[in-house]
Image: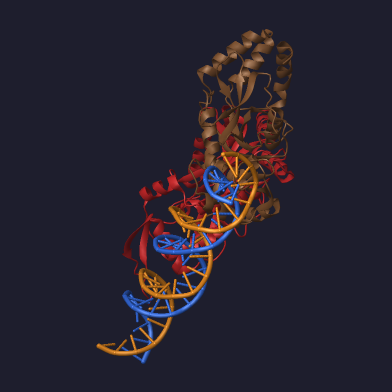
Chain colours: A brown, B red, C blue, D orange
Amino acid sequence: MADIESQIKILKDLIPKFLPGHSVDCVIFGYEDKELKVLLLNWKQMDIWALPGGFIFKDESMDDAAQRVLEERTGLSSIFLKQFHTFGKIQRSDHSQQEHHKKIMALMKPSKQDRKIVIDWFDHRFITTGYFALTDIRKATPRPDFLSEKCEWKSVSELPELIIDHAEIIQQAMHQLKIQLNYLPIGISLLPEKFTMIDLQKLYEAILGRPLERSNFQRKILKLGFLDRHEKLMSGAANKAPYLYSFNSTKYEELLEEGIGFRY
Amino acid sequence: MADIESQIKILKDLIPKFLPGHSVDCVIFGYEDKELKVLLLNWKQMDIWALPGGFIFKDESMDDAAQRVLEERTGLSSIFLKQFHTFGKIQRSDHSQQEHHKKIMALMKPSKQDRKIVIDWFDHRFITTGYFALTDIRKATPRPDFLSEKCEWKSVSELPELIIDHAEIIQQAMHQLKIQLNYLPIGISLLPEKFTMIDLQKLYEAILGRPLERSNFQRKILKLGFLDRHEKLMSGAANKAPYLYSFNSTKYEELLEEGIGFRY
DNA sequence: TAATATTGTGTCGAAATGATATAATAGATA
DNA sequence: TATCTATTATATCATTTCGACACAATATTA
């Protein structure tokens, strides 16, 4: 992270190019060690974390802005990314955030003029649209933005303290993920291209938060028909080797049409 | 609709109190004559229709703004209202809209100053959040806003020409309605307090767009357990009288927790 | 070759589903 | 009053699905 003083100048020049009052925040899910994780940023000088987010350029669509944020933080493009809720309460700010702005400002030592522009921008009321992304954690390379020191995967079951309403945003994202899983085979995106049935089951269990019966899970998933079976995985373990599967996106498209929900 | 000149002055004074760049649009569903309908506004002097929408006051939450729009157009409060998508493409304007602004301006004959403020406001890029509402059509009293001449229920199967992307917004709302119906007994809100089983079935058929089998529908719906059975409806017809049912909101709350979707 | 751990598939009773049949009944008709 | 008609409520039944569990298959170790 090069010269912070120059960063603040860049930011000051960018601000007029942003749509005022609207931001995007990305809940980027990953899956590792049988745990569902979220990519979080740690703000400089503060023991507080935040979702990767950003602003929308005046000549950029909101979806593109979210895509850009995702790519900047993970290096990944063209993966599952979908808006799930827009947060428009009045009190979308808190004391810790104001505290943070002060510290940032002190750190940056910008000119009076620049300082005012930047403070005004961040103190404004923002409506934010939440996106959730599903990534293969092994393909992503987390990168902090210029406001942050660290960019790390954190387990959803033990989240650190988060700014403003970001904990609520993550909660909502997880709820949506569960619901979407109920009518779409969405979770696949979190796994590498080839995976075993038990990998998939553990993932579903992590998302749904409850154990599933092994043989019945296999029966149901296979019946949905969006998995292709490949060669076996010889892991070296002293037991029967599991088949590898991959995701058949053609079948998935068909399912998208019908859904797999409750039928009246 | 009183003096239009004074209306434009009111608008000019309101504009500084709105959050810039963000609006809400309500897809207000009703159900009548076995058809799903949407409440639309007809703009003055133009053969084009629009969703009821509005802007968000700086000291108002986005949800409250949507609630306000709904109440202003229907006289109804505290009914089902939920955001379903936020539309953030760049090209959220079209020629017919610009045409419309010109006509409105000509009609209003505002001062140069007022004119500039109002034109600038409407020509700005807006991100809009779509809400869908479910109303008992017989309780609502449609009221045009000051920009519109008419406020009418239109069948979703034969929609008139709509401004900008409002046709797409309605499409999305209907899609969401179908999906939500798949895991929540949501449609109830469209019926009067007491209704027969065949009323409910016709409503579900209208939303889902396909016929359902009568006896099985009854069995399944009753098993979900959120209906209370009441006295029979003596319509005077020469046949067995159907029971009347009402919606049990306590049971509904329980269902909200579990959902009724696909289970892995 | 036997033992072990894990996977793939089969089984079985219970429940849900779709299709259809039957019984109940409010009024009309004779 | 008895019968007929239209519609509703419920029963039936073969088929499918579900959850729980059994059992066979198999890659490696002992």
In the rendered view, does B156 fall on the left or right side of A62? left
| C8 or B82, nearer to the observer | C8
Q: Where residue A82 appears, x then y in whole percent?
A: 63, 40
Q: Is residue B155 above or below residue A119?
A: below
Q: Where residue B217 appears, x then y in whole percent?
A: 46, 64
Q: Where residue A199 appears, x then y in whole percent?
A: 60, 43
Say how many tags the image has.
Answer: 0
Residue B136 visible in rendering: no
Q: Where residue B33 appears, x then y in whole percent?
A: 50, 63
User: Where does the N terminus of chain A fall, quadrant-wise?
Assistant: top right
| B253 or B59, nearer to the observer | B253
Residue B219 visible in rendering: yes
| A141 or B242, nearer to the observer | A141
In the rendered view, does A264 fall on the left or right side of A57? left
Q: Is residue B142 above or below residue A45?
A: below
Picture residue at 64% right of the left edge, 13% below the top: A116
In the rendered view, does B103 fall on the left or right side of A93? right
Q: Is residue A229 above or below residue A79?
A: below
Picture residue at 58% right of the left edge, 45% below the top: A198
Q: Is residue B216 above or below residue A48?
A: below
Write down the quadrant of residue B194 in the picture.
bottom left
| B109 or A41, nearer to the observer | A41
Write down the quadrant of residue A128 in the picture.
top right
